[in-house]
Image (cartoon, rainbow, N blue to C red):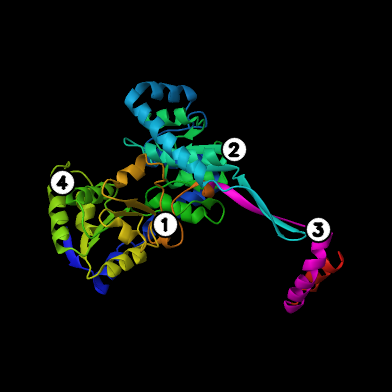
Amino acid sequence: MRILPLTDRNERKILASRRASSREAERVAARIVSDVRRRGDPALFSWTDRFDRLALGPRTVWVSHGEMLAARKSVSREFLAAIDHAERNIRTVARRQKPQDWTIEVEPGVRAGQRVRAIGSVGCYLPGGRFSLVSTLLMTVIPAQEAGVGEIVVASPQPGSALLAAAEKLGVRQVARVGGAQAIAALAYGTRSIPRVDKIFGPGNRFVTAAKKLVSNDCAIDMLAGPTEALVLAVRGNARFIAADLIAQAEHDPDAISVLVTTSVRLARAVASEIKRQLADLPRTNLARRSLTKNGAVLVAQTLAAAAGFVNRFAPEHLSLPGGADAIFDRIESAGSIFLGSWSAQSFGDYASGTNHVLPTGGIARTRGGLSVSDFVKCISVQEVSRAGVRRLAPVVEQFARAEGLAAHAQSVEVRK
């Protein structure tokens, strides 16, 4: 992996590497979304047959409960135990995150509050196939359940046994075997077979991301997630551990970005050497080789302040602080998920620590964090003004209304005096 000085030029190159958008993906997604929106089921099944080689109809689009039970019986006890453990931790964190109802007296005669209510229905999109992202099922369905969402629809192309077993354990009853842009369109607009949902969650390839962007004016989405990002900021640390984290995230996608930022030339060289050694132990087909060659880097900063400044401007999806974490932690303002200390492998957050692995990429962490229960609820503001409160607030409202030329606003409080 390249060892480079942290300069303005090198920073611009790294930041620019994730800005490329796929116009071709957006063009293809637009055609599919428009077709499914217009024709419904026939378009959904036609595109599914074309891309997934799966002939579906209204009776076969849904996975039966019997299939899910059979899938649960087919997986190992160890895997079911792993689901139980991860579920327990994810629920514990989700319950702590949930916004609460509250009411306060702002001033005599004036009360304000918040009423928290779940979104009515959600769609959880899960990339499927041979290696279904089972963990993403847990990361999207469990917060939805803790929020109290009434209808949860899972969409996954050719879902594997592990995913179906996990769905059955979580009590999911609606799993549709559709994927790609056509699944996003079906969830956003509804078809005869697939119900329209209020909000869509979950990651996907560039066509899925493009489709989510296209439907977002008509159906809410969680976020537009791009290729995985992993940054490690360390002044010291175990080179084997650091290399392992960078490689682990790099294997997600050939466009994944993995970067070590350090003030130590010695650590930079040790990690670069360790990455080369660990890659040699992986299958030749592992995507980490491609992504590290294309987007991997070790940046050597002159000062810790310069290194932290780069991290905040990059706003990474994953950020590890393995060495000198306490001194560095307070300097970090923007990251999707932070892993403190040498023992906190990023993979723990991917699966079982309890925090959510659906995280912002492409710099979106400058304005929001990872997925949480808050994304599945509505915080409704509530106010109650008594007759005494009218006497206190009316003069204030009248002044604002006159300043803004809104006579009817002023009249609506004057009639109550």
Label 4 to label 1: alpha-carbon separation: 37 Å
Q: Quadrant of the C terminus?
A: bottom right
Q: For mark 3, what is the residue?
A: 386
9 or 410, nearer to the observer:
410
The label on residue 26 is 1
Q: Is residue 241 left or right of residue 71?
A: left
Mark in front: 3 vs 2: 3
Q: Is residue 249 left or right of residue 209?
A: left
Q: For mark 2, what is the residue?
A: 150
Label 3 to label 2: alpha-carbon separation: 35 Å
Q: Which residue does the image show at 77% across and 77% down from the upper left?
A: 402
Location of residue 214 in the rendering, given as x and y in whole percent from the top left corner: 49, 55
Dot 3 or dot 1: first in sequence order is 1
In magenta stretch: residue 97: no
Label 1 to label 2: alpha-carbon separation: 32 Å
Q: Secondary structure at mark 3?
A: loop
Give the crowd class for mark 2: few <14, some 14-19, many >=20 residues within 10 Å: few
Amino acid carrying label 1: it is Glu
Mark in front: 3 vs 1: 3
Q: Secondary structure at mark 1?
A: helix
Q: For mark 4, what is the residue?
A: 278
Amino acid carrying label 4: it is Gln
Dot 1 or dot 2: first in sequence order is 1
In magenta stretch: residue 398: yes
Residue 121 falls in image quadrant: top right
Q: Which residue does the image show at 24% across and 51% down from the upper left?
A: 246
49 or 203, nearer to the observer:
203
